[in-house]
Amino acid sequence: MEWVGIWVSWAAGFLILGWLLKALQLLWWTPRTMEKKVRELGINGTSYRFLFGDLRESMQLYKEAKLKPMVLCHDIAPRVQPFLAQLTRTYGKVFLTWMGPTARIVITDPALIREVLLNKTDAFGKPKLSRVWSYVLPGLVSLDGEKWAVHRKIINPAFHVEKLKRMQPAFSSCCVELVGRFERLLGENKSCELDVWPELQNFTREVISRAAFGSSFEQGQRIFQLQDEQAKLMVESFANFQIPGYRFLPTKTNLRMKEIDAEVNSLLRGIIAKRETALQKGSDVNDDLLGLLLQSNESQMTREEIIDECKLFYFAGQETTSNLLTWAMVTLAMSPNWQSRARAEVLQVYGQEKPDFERLSQLKIVSMIIQEVLRLYPPAIFLSRRVKIPTTIDEYTFPEGVQLLLHVLLVQHDPDYWGKDANEFNPERFGDGISKATAKGGPALFSFGGGPRICVGQGFALTEAKMGLASILQKFSFELSPAYTHAPFIVITLQPQHGAHLILRRL
């Protein structure tokens, strides 16, 4: 028996030693080796600091920035990303930083970003995300390789132009309900003060529910509430999640995130089961997103994969567009001249008729405004890629395993590409289209990504935003409320920290 005890002790010792060596490699040797490779490329930046890298300094600067509102301007990068904005001024448009033990090369050169996004050699893939990220961003946005290609092929048809035309009744009825809610808030008054952000969230949630899932806002309301909570928990614990093994600890946050994920999965199973029951009873097959996913179920997608895609579109489908519309109303409240020009165009095209899909292409000024809002306030402020094989772009040969952070926000506010008025609201720059909007260097607008992985819901989001904004401009004018505090910040997407308080006036 003594020998058994000795062998068990030796085995346990070897296991612990193996774990320690693996941890040492992950947390010290691999980062130090990667840092040497990156610096040999001529890329400068911060040095690796054990375990946390730049996380502590980055999070501290971000927390300090959140405590102070901005002056009323569009130069938002120093508040939203203070650490990286600071490093850009120090190191230029390509530099090294550290997300825990992970090396990140930040790129703010649009030509390099285009090369990465358009690369067709499969050299760049999506980073391998921690399990907790799948709570908020599962499905298509996090998949890679063949799995991504299969899902993309299945989902693409749901957002073709002919499908968007069929969604017209859903878009239109949601616009009518939004205007109706504003009218009821005004009552007999000519004006009122309100926070338009939650109203616009309800609008986009209703649109995604009806148009993509054939259900109602009430049916998905609990899902939206849970996803909001999940995103906030994710951001609050972001630094901790970079520590290897942290997600396995039974902390209050970790346990709550698992509970939320389980409840969201259960609710989605219920929605899917109802649709399947309807199909079994001979009801017509809806060719919305959920219908296409269910049709693929037997051969190409598992039930869990369908649930993941539903979670993604419930979150991303409403979150990005509600933020876009909110920032559009804020910027137009700050720029009454452009608000008047946009309203005149809407009234010229539609008069008092409800905005429809067919005439949206005639809204040139509204389109220019939306592109400029996307430039100044992109919903997703960066894109990330992982170098799968050593790859040369221009003078850089990126080593395998390094992450690339393609920084949309910093590029889209850079005077080198957009001119001296880069931080001013000037939709006129898009008068001749996106490709000619920059002062030099080719296209530099990446609000929907680019290349093969460009956002599949881009057409859906732009259609929804144009119809929603046109419906509001047709009936109301608006200005900033004295209660408005300009404070953009990040909770996965770019949001107004203290809401969007405006004075709404009936025309």
Image (cartoon, rainbow, N blue to C red):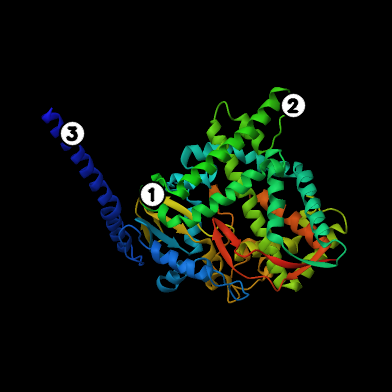
Residue 420 located left or right of residue 201: left
User: Is 471 situated above or below 292?
Assistant: below
What residue did someone put label 1 on?
A: 246
Disc 2 vs disc 1: Cβ atoms closer than 8 Å? no
Residue 89 sits in which quadrant?
A: bottom left
Percent x, y for residue 175?
78, 52
Q: Is residue 14 left or right of residue 207?
A: left
Position of 95 compared to 302: left or right? left
Residue in the foreground of this view, choosing between 108 and 322: 322
Name the image quarter holding the C terminus.
bottom right
Q: Secondary structure at mark 2?
A: loop
Residue depicted at x 40% and y 71%: 91
Q: Nearer the viewer, residue 205 or 94?
A: 205
Q: Viewer-nearest of labels 1 and 3?
A: 3
Q: Position of residue 6 (x, y in %)?
A: 13, 34
Q: Is residue 207 visible?
A: yes
Q: What's the distance in space between the residues labelled 2 and 1, CA to CA?
A: 47 Å
Q: Residues within 10 Å of mark 2 (few under 14, many from 20)?
A: few
If you read the primary sequence from the N terminus, does the residue marked by circle 2 or circle 1 appear first? 1
Amino acid under label 2?
Answer: Ser
Location of residue 185 by image quarter: bottom right
| Residue type (three-letter) at the residue carrying disc 3 | Val
Whether residue 456 appears in this view of the structure is no
Q: Which residue is mark 3?
A: 8
**Residue shown at 79% from the left, 70% from the top:** 340
Q: Dot 2 corresponds to which residue?
A: 283
Which of label 2 and label 3 is nearer to you? 3
